[in-house]
């Protein structure tokens, strides 16, 4: 009987210790998440163009409460959050106007950038309005820019981030493929054009991932999370061309931000 009581007491003590340690672990995890200082940089894919619910104070930058940075902030309650991503931003716009909140205490930085430098908007305008041959030539020009000029511009941005926030974990988010090939679209661009546009997105992502890795940053590839949700998929998380709101064309919807971008940031933050 005494032995049974001793075993019961020991088990109770052990259980209490485990529960105490587990509780402490949860509290420490929550405290760690809350202690994060997060800064969100980048272009329209980070500001949330296409997702609606824009903060009027952000003006033409069109920062959305449904953009992945705002969603991450709402879910994780960081110690501080600065959202400076802006629609239309190029690499030079980031270095000139978005880095103010960064400092030595910054823990997490997210950024998508490079698409506007490579001429994303002009490529799509050319392909929608002009011939297949002209579209393919414009894509070739964009790819040449990615080879010759974009790496140096990305280096400038990434170096500036590291200089201002040397301890931060930097997550560089890429771009989705636009089209599901062989999909439900019966009009618009040719399949050859859609294939070339998808290939250009892959090309841009590969170049961006290489530069990010060389700076010790983490690259977040969103092509897998958007697979099955491209334009022509029947369940698109990207706007097709919208003549009534041209600026939202080829940008993620709210579902694209929450289902395509947020999980990638969550897995790398």
Image (tube, rainbow, N blue to C red):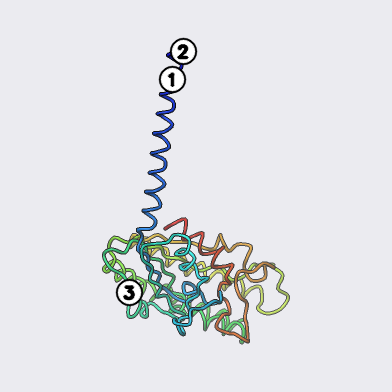
Q: Is residue 28 above or below residue 247?
A: above
Residue at 40% x, 59% y is 218
Q: Which residue is mark 3?
A: 99
Q: Residue 225 placed where, x, y %?
A: 56, 60
Mark 2 vs mark 3: in front: 2
Label located before the other in sequence (1 or 2): 2
The C terminus - image quarter: bottom left
Residue at 58% x, 81% y is 135
Q: Which residue is mark 1?
A: 7
Question: Does residue 99 appear left or right of residue 123 in this picture?
Answer: left
Label 1 neighbour load within 10 Å: few <14, some 14-19, many 20+: few
Residue at 46% x, 12% y is 1
The dot on residue 1 is 2
Q: Residue 208 placed where, x, y %?
A: 42, 67
Q: Residue 256 placed where, x, y %?
A: 57, 67
In this view, the residue in front, 134 or 82, is: 82
Element under disc 1: helix
User: How far apart, in angstroms, are the residues tagged by discs 1 and 2?
Assistant: 10 Å
Q: Quadrant of residue 228?
A: bottom right
Element under disc 2: loop
Label located before the other in sequence (3 or 1): 1
Q: Residue 83 placed where, x, y %?
A: 41, 73
Element under disc 3: loop
């Amino acid at each position: 009987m005494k032995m049974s009581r001793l075993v019961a007491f020991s088990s109770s003590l052990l259980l209490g210790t485990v529960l105490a340690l587990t509780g402490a672990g949860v509290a420490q995890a929550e405290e760690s998440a809350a202690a994060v200082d997060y800064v969100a940089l980048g272009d329209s894919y980070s500001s949330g163009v296409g997702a609606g619910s824009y903060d009027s104070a952000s003006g033409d930058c069109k920062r959305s409460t449904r953009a992945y940075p705002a969603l991450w902030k709402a879910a994780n309650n960081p110690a501080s959050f600065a959202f400076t991503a802006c629609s239309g931003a190029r690499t030079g716009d980031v270095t000139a106007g978005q880095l103010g909140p960064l400092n030595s205490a910054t823990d997490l930085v997210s950024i998508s950038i490079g698409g506007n430098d490579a001429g994303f908007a002009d490529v799509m305008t050319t392909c929608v309005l002009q011939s297949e041959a002209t579209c393919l030539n414009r894509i070739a020009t964009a790819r040449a820019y990615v080879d010759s000029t974009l790496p140096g511009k990305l280096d400038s941005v990434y170096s500036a981030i590291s200089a201002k926030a040397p301890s931060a974990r930097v997550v560089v988010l890429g771009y989705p493929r636009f089209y599901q090939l062989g999909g439900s679209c019966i009009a618009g661009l040719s399949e050859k054009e859609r294939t070339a546009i998808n290939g250009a997105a892959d090309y841009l992502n590969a170049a961006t991932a290489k530069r990010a890795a060389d700076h010790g940053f983490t690259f977040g590839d969103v092509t897998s999370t958007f697979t099955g949700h491209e334009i022509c998929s029947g369940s698109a998380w990207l706007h097709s061309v919208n003549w009534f709101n041209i600026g939202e064309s080829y940008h993620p919807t709210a579902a694209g931000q929450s289902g395509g971008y947020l999980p990638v940031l969550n897995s790398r933050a």
